[in-house]
Every structure is written in structure tokens, then in C-alpha cells.
Image (cartoon, helix red, strand yellow):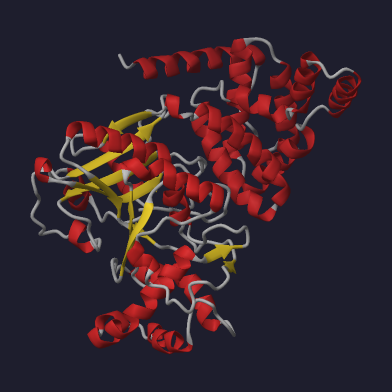
Amino acid sequence: MNTTSFFSDMLQSIAERGRRFLSLGPARNGDVNPVGTMEALCDTLLSSRGEASGMALAKNILDRWQGFDQDKRRDFMLALLSRFGPDIERLERAIDAYRADPTPKALLEMSMAAEPRRQELIRRLNLAPNGIATLVRMRADLLELKAQNPDLEAVDTDFAHLFGSWFNRGFLVLRPISWSTPADILEKIIRYEAVHHIGGWDELRRRLAPEDRRCFAFFHPQLVDDPLIFVEVALTREMPPNIADLLKEDRAPIRATDATTAVFYSISNCQEGLRISFGNFLIKQVVEDLRRDLPRLDTFVTLSPVPGFADWLSRERQAETSNALSAADRSRLAALDEPDWADQAEIAAAIQPSLTAAAAWYFLRARNLHGKTVDPVARFHLGNGARLERINFLGDRSERAMRQAHGLMVNYLYKLDDIETNHEAFATRGEVVAAPAIRRLIPADRSSRSLAPGPDVFPAGVRSADAPGRKGDKEFTS
């Protein structure tokens, strides 16, 4: 018998007995104030001491929430904000006590008093059978609601704080995904793939079955059949300049033992409510596993999209003055407005020098309003200690890549001996570690000009790993 399933069934049985004991039922359509009823149930849950009754209350609350429409879900989140914050009177007493006598005991009491009541409420809701899955969906709704109600940031902070503990790396399990993986998980890989669309089972087989392909995913013990994040890997003999060569139907696979390079070409976050950065753990763990199984591998790179580049370049082209573009660049890049420019060899060749130089500026010099590198994918990989290794002109000719990046892709190199040094340079000084060839793309007369700030926004369909609370973020990486 599956241990997890048995445990889940046992919890369900306990919750049902508690429900009968408390005479709890589902929400009724005639309930005059369903959100008020939910608040009362939450108060009862916080005061509950029995495990069976606590499970039953938690399950009842989550069942009712799932039956709410979007307006009632918003009202419930606002109730969490207004009614389930810290106990202000207790906090004020704790502050006064600490000021009078700043002992460790007084500090502990002040810390406990400052914790919002909703954190304990969320912990108790997690007691319900499958509670964690429902709470993840609840946070996905909260992230959408937060865009219209910025004050809900405080509630989201509590969810993020607790999820950071519950989904700690120590609880995550890395599992290989292969063509023999159960079909229900493979269906989710197809559905969750957010970088390079998987057209169906045949295409999925081409990504999983060949000897020179790998896929790995993180799972959580409470979400055993639902991946949190997964990475697709191509084993090659060289660093690839475009995605078409990796994914084409008629390519000739190589033996895994002949590969010298591991290419991370797609990383997809699967749970909208879990905007927590798992990707850095994932890459490092996969590198360790691949090196153990295939000792000849000595190069670890990504083939990554550049999701914010086209929007940034459009703003630079329209600006009255631009540090990134010369007048000649603007003139050449005007051809980008022609829908079929990439199919015309002469036009593409004329555009390439200006486009790649602009891309170098975008990575090395452009900053958002917070002083950070503009591109979310770059922030993720550079923050993990990778080096910006190569800019690939027309590396991805898909419709989305042409729209978001004019077809541009880049390789980030994970050189194991340099990862810590690169991470420190980026984290402490904001320095982008890049190959000399990329630095040379910026003309000498512009290389010393001031950094160019840009808005901290992402195009629709982009999920940034290091900006987990941003509305509309759909995928971020390689």
C-alpha cells in the first residue's frame, strides 16, 4: 500500500469524524454572510485544541473557500488582513516590557506578539487533508488579487514566509522524469512546460526517450504526483547557438557517454502559488547528479530566452536620446518593424551588429528602477553564479521569441570553480560577469556612459524567479 495515500486516507477519516462531531456542513447558497461565517470558523479554529475537531474545521474552511467566487475570495483575504493581524494590545505590552527590561525572555515575547494571527491560522489550515495543495492554490489567487489590492502584500508575506519553511530544500525530492514515468506526471510536464511548447506525446517522447536527453523535477512529500519545477537537459558535444537544433524532429542522437556538454534549455515553474526560487537548488543538484553519472561532462550551460529585451529596445528606439543606441543603430534597427525581416538574409545581416550590441548594453549596462539588471532570466542565472557567455542572434525563431526578444537567445556558463566568485560579484557589487567577446560588443565611445534605468516590468507570460510576487509572471528561464 502507498504510505502517502494511506496517511492521507487516515487524515480524511479523522477529519470526517470531527466534522460529524461538530455538525459542520458545506457552505449553503442561502448563507447571508458567507465571508462572516468563514471568519467565525477561523476564530474557532484558532481557539481549537482537539486534533480531530481542528482537522474538521480546517477542511470545512478550505472547502468553503473553494466554493467562493472571486469577489468572496477577495473579501476573505481582506478579512485576513484586517481581522487576523497581530494582537495589538499584547504587542504594545511586550514592547513596553522590553523597553523596561530588554531580556531575552522579553524579546521572545515581543517576537511572538508581533506574529500575525493569520500565520497560525494558515498553519492550522494545513492540518486539513490535502491542505497544502489548497493553500498553494489559495496563494495563486492571492497573487492576482494583490495587483488590485496592494495592502494584501502583508498577507502574501505570511504565506511566503510559511511556504519558505514548508518547501525548504531539505523537504524536496529530486526525481528523474523519463518516458517510463507515470502518465499522469507526464501529462503535467506537457501542461506546465512554459518555455518551449510541447505539442503532444510524440514531441514529449523526443525530449525524454533519447539517450542524450534528461529531465529532472523537484517534488514535495505532500504533493507526490505534482512537480514543483522541472528542467530539461540536452547532452551535446558543444554549446548550442539555437534551440531548433536541439528540438528538431530528425536530429541524430549521440551516446550519453560521448557528451561533453550539458545544456539546460528549459526550466519551468509548475505551481503558480509557489513563487519561491527553487531553480538555483535544482540546477546545482542536477549538475551534481550528471557529473556523477557522466564523468566526461565538463561544460554546463543554458540556452536561455531574453524575455524583456524587445520591450526595452522599443523604449530605447522611441526615446529622444539613448545611451544604448547611436543614430546609425536606430536607422538599421528600423527594419525590425518589418514582419518578415528575419527571412531576408541581407536585412538580417545588416541588423545583426546593432542588435547584438544593443543586447550587450541591455545585459551589462541597463538597470531597472531598483538598480538591478533589467532581464529577469539574467538576474536568476547571474545571481546563481553563472557567466554571460554568448549572445545568439536568431537563436529562437518561434513566434513568442520573435515578439519578446527579436529571436535572441543567450548562453549562461556555469563554470564550477567560478560560481561563488561570480555570485559574490553580482550580489554585492551588481557586477555582470561576462565573456570578453560580449564586453567588446559595446563600442568604446559608449562603454563609459551612465547606466540606463528602465521600468521593473515584465512582458505578459514571463515568470521571474527572483520577483516571485509579480502579477502575470509565467516563466523565467532557460
User: Would residue 141 be found to the left or right of residue 218 on screen?
Assistant: right
> As rendered, which of 239 and 440 lies closer to the eye?
440
Q: Is residue 222 visible?
A: no
> As rendered, which of 358 and 465 lies closer to the eye?
358
For the image, the number of numbered tags is 0
Q: Quadrant of residue 297?
A: top left
- Height in image: 238 above or below 22? below
| Residue drawn at (89%, 22%) of the image | 93
User: Would residue 393 be found to the left or right of residue 203 on screen?
Assistant: right
Q: Quadrant of residue 4?
A: top left
Residue 146 locus on image (x, y percent)? 65, 50
User: Would residue 390 be found to the left or right of residue 96 on screen?
Assistant: left
| Residue drawn at (17%, 35%) of the image | 295
> As rendered, which of 98 and 31 lies closer to the eye?
98
| Residue drawn at (55%, 73%) of the image | 449
- Height in image: 182 above or below 429? above
Q: Quadrant of residue 177?
A: top left
Quadrant of the image containing the N terminus? top left
Residue 99 locus on image (x, y percent)? 89, 24
